[in-house]
Amino acid sequence: MPYLAKILLYPVKSLDGIEVENARVLPSGALEYDREFAIFDERGKFVNGKRHAKIHLLRAQFELFNRNILLQIPGGDSQQIFHLDEERQALETTLSDFFGFAVILKQNSLMGFPDDTNSLGPTVISTATLTEVASWFPNLSVGEMRRRMRANIEIGGVPAFWEDQLFTEQGNLLSFRVGDVDFLGVNPCQRCIVPTRDSYLGEAYPNFQKIFATQRQATLPNWVASSPFNHFYRLSVNTQLPPSSAGKILQIGDEIEILLK
């Protein structure tokens, strides 16, 4: 039986994630605390992994309920602790010094700062998929591939690419349920430059995207809806959550059921 094996939240967009036992669904369909904050430059542009590989050098831990971030700056002697609400200016100063230009930390507690603003629900992948994809790249561990893909929900008890059942032809939605939380599967997530880089150092893996796309096409199950694949640099499933899911809790161990194909 497919089940919810991991829940990962990324409180500050592009920084390290935190593994949790449960997560609450917001009215927008996003998960509480996920990408709640994001770093911006003075022009209002994201300071993220797509634009600034240096961000991979930052290490962050989070105390969600205390609203603290524990930040390790490269070359620093120890972690610095900041309260995300009460010490935001000090955090911005520290981050500005690290990047070498002024940055600000913005907050959106309603929907966070997702890449796909049309699909605010958590992204979904399976542990077996991460294991398979990691095997395409010598010296990359499953844990490293997990950090590169940055999905929110990880499914256990299934074979690789099982989650490709959770979307259908382009323009249609597929209903599934995790515990008592209803989901709508939208499409396979288009990947950016971030997965090509070492999640700790920011160094690019040679020909990552080409190797990935070739292997993804070769291993794509024959039952997968083909119209969403205008290219094969896609992995994990984007989702939307209906209003009926607002306030409900996702819990490790929840069973997963496809409702409508």
Image: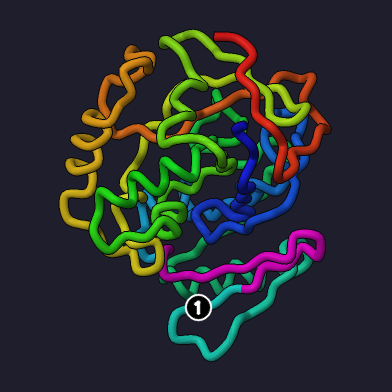
Residue that mark 1 sits on = 73
Q: Amino acid at mark 1?
A: Ile
In the image, residue 47 above or below residue 248 = below
In the image, residue 256 above or below residue 195 = above
Residue 173 located left or right of residue 99 = right
* Coordinates of residue 192 in the picture (x, y in percent): 34, 41
* Coordinates of residue 89 in the picture (x, y in percent): 67, 67
Residue 248 located left or right of residue 77 = right
In the image, residue 1 above or below residue 182 = below
Q: Residue at x 67, y 65 (%)?
A: 62
Tell me the magenta residue range.
55-70
Secondary structure beneath dot 1 equals loop
Q: Residue at x 62, y 45 (%)?
A: 5
* Quarter where residue 141 is shown: bottom left
> Is residue 7 one of those drawn in magenta?
no
The colouring scheme, among rainbow, by chain, secondary structure or one colour, is rainbow
